[in-house]
């Protein structure tokens, strides 16, 4: 989902990301260095929206407790639908902000004790863990411990591939598909994302 939504955002926001804030942070630094005020404002707005998505997602997760997964995914789907409407109304930046809020909140699906256990919208950490586990395997450690992290990376790349390949359908329809897909994930996520009794 993160790769899919990020590809849609990247292609409709002139090279800005909606889930990959490292890229937007680099663009922000470049914009500061080259004194391009419009790009500074755009990058800062997207980064701020991502933080707002994480904050609002965290607050919702805390209040929802055992229903956290359902509430977060429904919130993400609602934001994707709103983003699609924004693009439909030719309000690209509003559509992008909705996507960014959704991607920030999406990371709260796997929050444990207030911290993110698995980052869903960025994969640098997954690649680092893949490399570490491959190195351990070469030194006699578990041979396949790297597979879950490599799968997470492949999932993001696969989602981006789907989003880019369907780009001719337009952002409104693609984000509607994303919202429907997110809602369809709720029963699957509820079966597979466990929550300990005292976790928030």
Image (cartoon, rainbow, N blue to C red):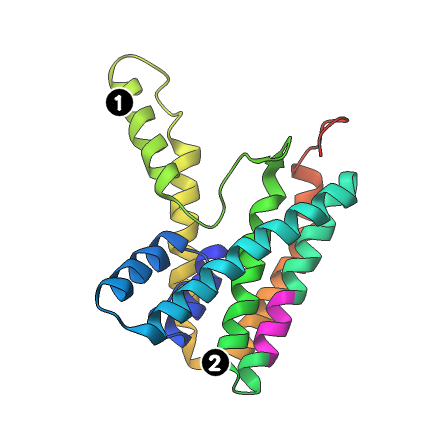
181 sits to left or right of 171: right
Return the x and y of residue 55 as percentages of the image width and height: 61, 50
Residue 69 seen in render: no
Please check the rendered image and state whether residue 83 is part of the magenta-colored stretch, yes or no: yes
Query: Residue drawn 29% across and 30% down?
Result: 131
In 3D space, how far apart are the residues under numbered discs 1 and 2 (Cα atoms)?
Answer: 43 Å
**Which image quarter: residue 75?**
bottom right
Q: Quadrant of residue 162?
A: bottom left
Crowd rating for badge 2 (residues with CA inside 10 Å; few <14, some 14–19, many 20+): some
Q: Residue at x 42, y 81 (%)?
A: 168
Q: Main secondary structure of the magenta part?
A: helix
For the question of whether residue 5 can be seen, the reply is: yes
Image height of 77 relative to 60, above or below: below
Residue drawn at x 50%, y 59% as measured from the top left? 48
- What is the secondary structure assignment of the residue under circle 1? helix
Place of residue 111 in the rendered image (x, y in percent of width and height, measured from the top left): 61, 38
Nearest the eye: 163 or 48: 48
What quarter of the picture does the C terminus occupy?
Answer: top right
Q: Closest to the observer: 64 or 1? A: 64
Magenta run includes residue 51: no
Residue under pointer 2: 170
Residue at numbered disc 1: 135
- Tell me the magenta residue range: 79-85
Question: Could you tell which of marks 1 and 2 lies nearer the N-terminus?
Answer: 1
**x%, y% of residue 71?**
73, 52
């Amino acid at each position: 989902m993160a790769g899919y939504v990020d590809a849609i955002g990247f292609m409709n926001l002139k090279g800005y990301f909606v889930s990959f804030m490292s890229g937007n942070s680099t663009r922000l630094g470049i914009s500061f260095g080259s004194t391009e005020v419009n790009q500074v404002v755009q990058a800062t707005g997207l980064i701020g929206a991502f933080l707002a998505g994480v904050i609002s997602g965290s607050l919702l997760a805390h209040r929802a407790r055992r229903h956290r997964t359902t509430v977060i995914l429904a919130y993400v789907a609602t934001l994707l639908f709103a983003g699609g409407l924004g693009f439909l109304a030719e309000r690209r930046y509003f559509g992008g902000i909705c996507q960014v809020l959704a991607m920030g909140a999406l990371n709260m699906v796997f929050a444990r004790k207030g911290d993110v256990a698995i980052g869903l919208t960025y994969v640098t950490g997954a690649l680092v863990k893949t490399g570490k586990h491959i190195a351990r395997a070469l030194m006699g450690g578990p041979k396949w411990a790297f597979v879950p992290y490599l799968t997470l990376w492949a999932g993001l790349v696969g989602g981006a591939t789907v989003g880019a390949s369907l780009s001719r359908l337009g952002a409104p329809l693609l984000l509607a598909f994303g919202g429907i897909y997110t809602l369809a994930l709720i029963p699957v996520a509820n079966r597979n994302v466990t929550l300990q009794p005292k976790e928030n």
